[in-house]
Image (spheres, rainbow, N blue to C red):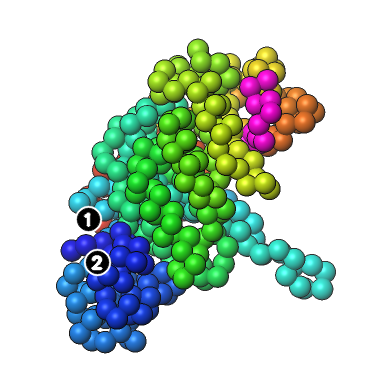
Amino acid sequence: MENIFNYNLDELKSVLTPSFRAKQVWRWLYINYEDDFNMMINIPKEMRNKLHNQFSAKNLEINNIQTSIDGTKKYLFSTKDNYTFESVFLKMRDKEFDENDNIKSREKYTICVSSQIGCKIGCKFCRTGESGFTRNLTVGEIVEQVIAIKKENKILPEKCVNIVYMGMGEPLDNFDNLIKAIKIISHIDGLSISTRRQTISTSGISPMIDALGSLNLGVQLAISLHAVNDETRNKLMPINKVYNIESIMESVRKFPIDMRKRVMFEYLMIKDINDSIKNAKDLLRLLNGIKAKVNIILFNPYSGSKFQRPDIEQAKRFADFLCKKGLLCTIRESRGSDIDAACGQLKYVDSKNKNVSHETK
Ligand code: SF4
């Protein structure tokens, strides 16, 4: 049985004739979040049977949902071949009203999508890296995470959702599937999540950043930098021995950036490793001339991790120094850390239990 979410609209048109039928099915899948072909009532019975026999629109099961005190939800998905991976749903902002009860701003959601089961990169601070690499997610599995999470949270199709490829895995290590998934997710007749709302976060595989840039898709780029010199970065991220900081910066400089946007540099701050003012000065020098934004994330210790969370006052001094020098810098609130849904905390879980359970911490 084929995963129907592996197909883009043109491919679907080539198997469903007349082609307007493909568009109808597409709308059922991406706008109505319908996973049962028999419920697609405007499709002739014969075609529904064909779809049922050839395709599956439910290729992932939600095995578990954990809800954080801040509302962040972590989903444990299982695949048809019995592997599991995690994705995260974040409600970034509630609907806000002004004094006259008019809507001032709408809710803002972000879905943190996984691209692989496990990861080859092996960053030393990351639980996913510790679990090793199992396999790439297929196009359909990447796309279906978004649909499953939107459906479970009853998010209407027209609501704004941002996608960050910051879940399990290195997205640029699953390049072809990622690119096809991005195009399907942004398709105007379906989920319609613009490429400008999709951010690819990479550990810095320079040639693949170049390849992504050459496609000029309009996606946002985030670099997991975490260190300002190769010596420290080699220790935190072994990939740096292959693609060092200089090669990453060279690729970033060439990357096509939307006029209104900046390249995000993720900086996981770890106590006594990369949190000094000297490090801040070096970071400033490194990003000189790049339209950049620095996002400081305080390391979230997990059981067995050898690093420590930095002092918040030190993080503020670090951020203040950069801001005063004119570099946009924020300390990111670490959401979902009580359910291990924060950055670097997702992991492969061997789960045989297929019952959905909701846990709240
Ligand atoms: S931080 Fe990202 S790239 Fe590094 S091991 Fe974890 S999932 Fe892979």
Q: Position of residue 355 (x, y in %)?
A: 28, 59
Say if 54 sits above or below 231 in the image.
below
| Mark 2 residue CB less than 8 A from any atom of ligand 1 | no
Q: Residue furthest front?
A: 214
* Ligand 1 positioned in quadrant: top left
Residue at 65 percent across and 35 percent down: it is 292
Q: Is residue 18 magenta?
A: no
Q: Residue at x 33, y 31 (%)?
A: 120
Q: Earlier in the sequence, mark 1 or mark 2?
A: 2
Disc 1 residue type (three-letter): Lys
Question: Left of 180 or right of it: where is 105?
Answer: right
**Circle 2 crowding by C-alpha within 10 Å: few under 14, some 14–19, many from 20:** some
Image vertical order of residue 24 relative to residue 151, above or below: below
Q: Which residue is mark 2?
A: 56
Q: Position of residue 35 (x, y in %)?
A: 32, 71
The x, y position of residue 287, in whole percent, is 65, 26
In the rendered structure, find residue 80 and report the number of the disc placed on it: 1
In the image, 359 versus 246, the foreground residue is: 246
Q: Quadrant of the N terminus?
A: bottom left
Nearer to me, 49 or 253? 253
Tags 1 and 2 touching, CB below 8 Å: yes
Residue at figure coordinates x 43%, y 44% from the top left: 167
Query: In the rendered structure, which segment of residues is drawn in magenta?
Result: 285-295
77 or 177: which is nearer to us? 177
